[in-house]
Amino acid sequence: MKRFALLVLALSVTFAAGAQETYPYAERDTCTLYLDIWRPDQPSSKPAILYVFGGGFIMGKRSDTHVVKWFRKLNEEGYPVVAIDYRLGMKGFKVKKTLGGAQKAIDRFVMSQRIGVEDVFSAVSFLAAHPELGIPSDNIVISGSSAGAIISLASAYNIANGNTEGLPQGFNFKGVMSFAGGIISNHGKIKFSQAPCPILLFHGMDDTLVAYRHHGILGLELWGSDYIAEMLMKKGWNCSIWRFKNRAHDVAGYTDCLWPIEKEFLEKNVIQGIPCTVDAVVDDPSLPLWKAWGRLSVDNVYREH
């Protein structure tokens, strides 16, 4: 940590609206991980949005063009944004059509989620260790798209189940905003031991990449937004879900399209602490439809052909 403190001092910047401040937050065996901070015009007590990019654990970056517009919208509304790197556990990996290949894939998917959560926890701990950056670590909403949404939900799941190694003592996120996410498991159905932070779920009902409800093969299971919402709502816990008819994995790219819904969740469920629950089915032809995204599936993304 001493090395990173020195690096932070070396990366002296002037804080300005829309400025992209970059800091190294963790060093791994294969890479150094960085985070960017995007700030609103004026200091605010609103929670920071910690964003985890998508890309199937094989690609993507923290400054993807399609989310920068959303970062600026959040800044305009007074929300700082922290966009992080994480290790891409599936990069360069293809699933072989053998039993042994399938088992290796299971191990790789589980590992990808696990190291993503580790990296999120490291980013939070870095922010806690550097209060001079002005991002209070006790006031963070985590949000992600696709693989980033899986990591975001898995982070909240780990905290709810007491798996908090690497986090400041007593830490919890103020909320989760998940765009086409789920939770990977190799031990059957997922179960929250206690109430997680407030969760907002967006998912296409025709999604075949990150399953809308559930996908399982040879012991690897992905529990999607429909299942998570049902489980949490039965407990009376703070969860809302927006289900998009005639949409597949397109919803992973809807960060900037759904701002009014996000704003209500942030203001009501997170800032005011009102446990407002929404279960909505949306059929809106005006929302973007990206045919290439809609055709994505586990088979055509990861399979060795």
Image: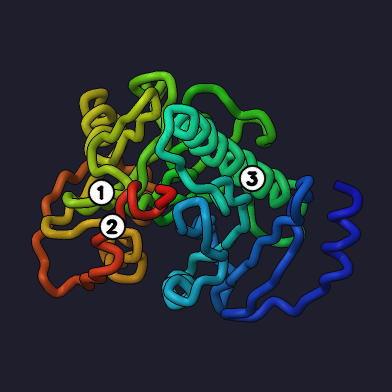
Amino acid type, residue under disc 1 in the picture: Thr
Residue at 40% x, 48% y is: 303
Q: Are marks 1 and 2 in contact (CB under 8 Å)?
A: yes
> Disc 1 and disc 2: Cα gap in Å?
7 Å
Q: Are marks 2 and 3 in contact (CB under 8 Å)?
A: no
Q: Which residue is mark 1?
A: 208
158 with respect to 131 (left or right): left
Q: Which mark is residue 119?
A: 3
Could you say whether the residue bearing mark 1 is in a helix, strand or loop?
loop
Residue 143 lies, in percent from the top left, at 45, 53
296 with respect to 81 (left or right): left
Of residue 264 and residue 88, the one placed in the foreground of this image is 88
Q: Which residue is mark 2?
A: 249
Which is more foreground, mark 1 or mark 3? Answer: 1
Mark closest to the chain's N terminus, 1 or 3: 3
Q: Quadrant of residue 294?
A: bottom left
Tell me if mark 3 has few (under 14), some (14-19) or many (20+) residues whose alpha carbon lies within 10 angstroms of its own: many
Mark closest to the chain's N terminus, 1 or 2: 1
Could you say whether the residue bearing mark 2 is in a helix, strand or loop?
helix
> Disc 2 and disc 3: Cα gap in Å?
25 Å
Residue 89 lies, in percent from the top left, at 58, 46
Q: Are marks 1 and 3 in contact (CB under 8 Å)?
A: no
Amino acid type, residue under disc 3 in the picture: Asp
Residue 124 lies, in percent from the top left, at 64, 46
Which is more foreground, mark 2 or mark 3? Answer: 2
81 with respect to 178 (left or right): right
147 with respect to 233 (left or right): right
Could you say whether the residue bearing mark 3 is in a helix, strand or loop?
helix
